[in-house]
Image (spheres, coloured by chain):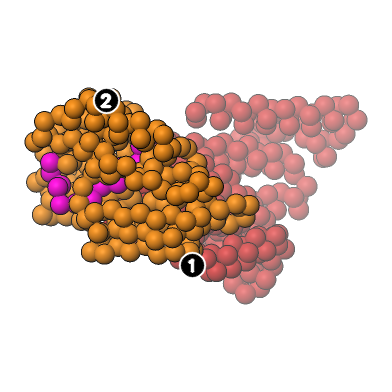
Chain colours: A red, B orange
Amino acid sequence: MLLRRIYQFLMIYALGIALLLALKYGLGLSDYVVPGPGEIGRTAAVYAGPYLLAVLNTLAVAILGHLLAIGLATAVAILGRLTAWVGSFIRTAAYNIQAYPIVAVAPIIFILLGDGLASRLLIAAMICYFPLLLSFIGIFSEPVSEIEHFYESTRRTTWRLQIKIRAFENVHKISTVVVGSATMAVVGTIVAEFIAATAGIGYSIRIALYQSDLAKILVALFLIGVVTSLYLVSLEGLGNALQARLRRS
Amino acid sequence: MNLEVRHLAFRHPNASSDLFSDVSFQLPAAGFHALFGPSGVGKTTLARMLTGDIRNFHGEISRDGSRRVLYTYNLERLPGWSSVRRHIEETAPPARRRQAGELIAEFGIEGCVDARFSRLSMGQQNRANLVRYLLQEFEVLIMDESLANVDELTREKIILKIKALFPERCFLYISHNVAEVARFCGRVLVLRAASKAPQVVCIQGADQAAERPAPPPQLLERAMLEIVHAA
C-alpha cells in the first residue's frame, strides 16, 4: 500500500516536472522562469532539510486540526441524531456553511486570532470538518434496524449503544471518510500558512513565490507529496488494522 | 383470553386498498400458535400491531395480562464486536442466565456460539437469535420465520423444547410450512386477503408436545386440509 501510493505520487510528480521542462525547452523559457534540472537538484540539496522540517511542522498542525475536526464532527453528529429537528437543523446548517470557501473566511480568522498556531489549526480543522460532519450525521442517524430491533423491543437501547452499533456497522465508511479528509486537513494547513503565518511549508512557499524561485516550490511540493502519502498510508493502515481486528473471531 | 383483536382495519399510507378490513381473533394466554397465510397478506404488519409498533389502525387490540409482547424475525443480527455466547449472556436477565446454556445445547449451536455472529450459518444465526429472545421477560413472543434455514428435525426438536420449557407463555409462530403449523400449533390463525370474509380463520392444530403421543395421521391431514382450504 505504501509503495503503491509513493509510486503513484512519484509518477505524477515526474510527469509534472517533465511537462514543465518540455515547456521550458519547447518555448525557450529562461532559467529564471523555469529552472533546469541542475538548478532544481542544487536547490534540493540545500533546502531539502529545512523544508522537510517545515513540512513536518505543517503535518503536525494538520494532524491536530484533523483530530479536532473528527472529535467535533463526532460530537455534533451524535447530538444531531437525538431528535429529528435538531438533526435536520444541523444537516441544513452544515450544507449551507460548507458552501462558503473557508479560504474566503480565513482573513476574518487571521484578523481575530493573528497569524499564529491557533489560526492554522482552526483553518485546517474547518476545511476537513464539514465533509466529516455530513458523513457522520448520515452514519449516526441511520438505524441498523436488524440489530437495534432487539434492544428497542427489550427496552435496552441507550444512545451509547446506538452509536456503538452504527459506528461498528459503518467502520469501513468511517475509515474511508477519515482518510479522505486527512488530505483536506493538510491542504487547509498549507493554505492557512500561505495566506498568513510565520511557519510551515505554506509559509516557505509564499517566500519562494515572492523570490520567483520555482525550484524551491518544486522541492517543497515533492516533500509535501511524500509526507502526505506517508500520513495517508498510516491512516489507511490503522483503519485496516482496526477492521481486521473487528472481523476476527 | 390473553390477546384479543376486534374489528381491526388498516391501510398502509399511500396504498390504494385496505390491508385489513375487519380482522378479529382471540388467542389464549398460553400455548404455541401459528399465524399462517400467503406472502404479502399482512402477517408481519399484524405482528407489528400486536407489539404496538404500528398504532395508526382502526379497531381494538386487547392485551389483557400481556404487558410485554416481543417480536423477532429471521433477518435480525447480533452485534459483531463480541462472541454470540457473550451477547446472549450479557442480554439475559440474571435469573435466566443458567437457562442460556441449556437452550444453546438443545438448539444445537453449542459448537459455534464462541464465534462472532457473522461467522455462523443462516440457520445457526436464526437459532442464536431465538435463544436470545427466549431468555427475555415476555408474555407473548411472535416468531416471524424464526426457524428459517434450519433443518426439519432440528426445527421439530426446537419447537417441542420451547413448548416444554415455556408452557405458561404464548407463542405466535409465523411460518409458511403447512405441515409444521398443523402438527405443532394449538391454534392456526389463517390470515387471508382483505376481500375475503372473515379475514382470519381460526383452525385447531394437532398441538403435538413432547410429553404426549404423536397425533394420529388423520388428524394432521384434516388440519392441513383445513388450513390450505382456508388460505
Q: What's the magenta region?
A: B164-177
Q: Is residue A111 left or right of residue B117?
A: right
Question: Which three-letter amino acid code belongs to the residue tagged 1?
Answer: Thr
Image quarter of the C terminus of chain B: top left
Image-based side of B27 in relation to A119, left or right: left
The answer to whether residue A140 is seen in the rendering is: no
Q: Within the image, what quadrant is residue A50 found in?
A: top right
Callout in the foreground (2, 1): 2
Q: Chain of mark 1?
A: A
Q: Is residue A74 above or below residue A167?
A: below
Q: Is residue A172 visible?
A: yes
Q: Amino acid at mark 2?
A: Glu
Disc 2 designates what residue?
A: B152
Residue placed under numbered mark 1 in the picture: A83
Q: Which mark is residue B164?
A: none
Instruction: Establish if A60 lies above or below A113.
Output: above
> What SS does tag 2 mark?
helix
Looking at the image, which residue is at 59% across and 72% down?
Answer: A113
